[in-house]
Image (cartoon, coloured by chain):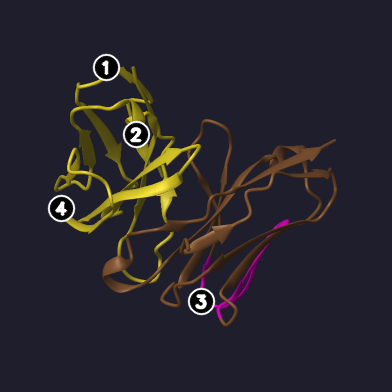
Amino acid sequence: QKEVEQDPGPLSVPEGAIVSLNCTYSNSAFQYFMWYRQYSRKGPELLMYTYSSGNKEDGRFTAQVDKSSKYISLFIRDSQPSDSATYLCAMKGRGSTLGRLYFGRGTQLTVWP
Amino acid sequence: KAGVTQTPRYLIKTRGQQVTLSCSPISGHRSVSWYQQTPGQGLQFLFEYFSETQRNKGNFPGRFSGRQFSNSRSEMNVSTLELGDSALYLCASDYGSGMNTEAFFGQGTRLTVV
């Protein structure tokens, strides 16, 4: 079992839809949770960063972390064609393992006009 | 504030050759980590350097090595290249300690081995 599981999709939605992306994980030591957006042939771009459990909102994006269920989510409201990309969840622990990110496989999202 | 810079952006090498990739982190960041991204395997962790010391290492063969300089710039080297080493190589930087540990990626170096 991989430490981070993410449904690769693909996910295809109409413009304006609410998109829900999810990841589960098995390592209870993970404390920091991130969502990255990656356009084709580009490096991952950090979208959201959350420490421990809770919600965080930034514009059209909301990140949720439920450590008791080992489950994280990213919601995109009023989705736009420019949101079409691969979304990667990532997480890491503390101390000596702080520098290592554990990634999901990524979910490919297409938003059509 | 400049982002993470990786050079070169593209490389074509022949099997058996070696290659060196470079990564300049965001100013003030002391941790640099390297990842290999392929369509089949996703993002796989290679190693991480913090204050010129390798702090974490992934499950890659010894042909993959790295180092970090006193200015936090990092290089990774792949010797005796194989066709399967063709991938996008990404580096990420962050402060490496404390609470602000957001990791930022460069645009990657796309390596093609022929």
Measure how far apart labels 1 and 4 are at the Cα level: 30 Å
Location of mark 4 (residue): B52
What amino acid does circle 1 point to? Thr
Measure how far apart labels 1 and 3 are at the Cα level: 45 Å
Chain of the residue where label 2 is placed in the rendered structure? B
| Relative side of A110 to A72, left or right | right
Q: Are marks 4 and 2 in contact (CB under 8 Å)?
A: no
Location of mark 3 (residue): A52
Which tint was used for chain B?
Answer: yellow
At a point 38% along the width and 25% down the height, the residue shown is B9
| Residue B51 seen | no
What amino acid does circle 2 point to? Gln
Read off the magenta span.
A50-67
What amino acid does circle 4 point to? Glu
Chain of the residue where label 4 is placed in the rendered structure? B
Measure how far apart labels 3 and 2 are at the Cα level: 31 Å
| Residues flagged by tags 1 and 4 on a common chain | yes
| Relative side of B36 to B49, left or right | right
Location of mark 1 (residue): B14
User: Circle 2 — which element?
Assistant: strand
Location of mark 2 (residue): B6
Quick one: quadrant of the N terminus of chain B? top left
User: Circle 3 — which element?
Assistant: loop
* In-front residue for pair A24/B10: A24
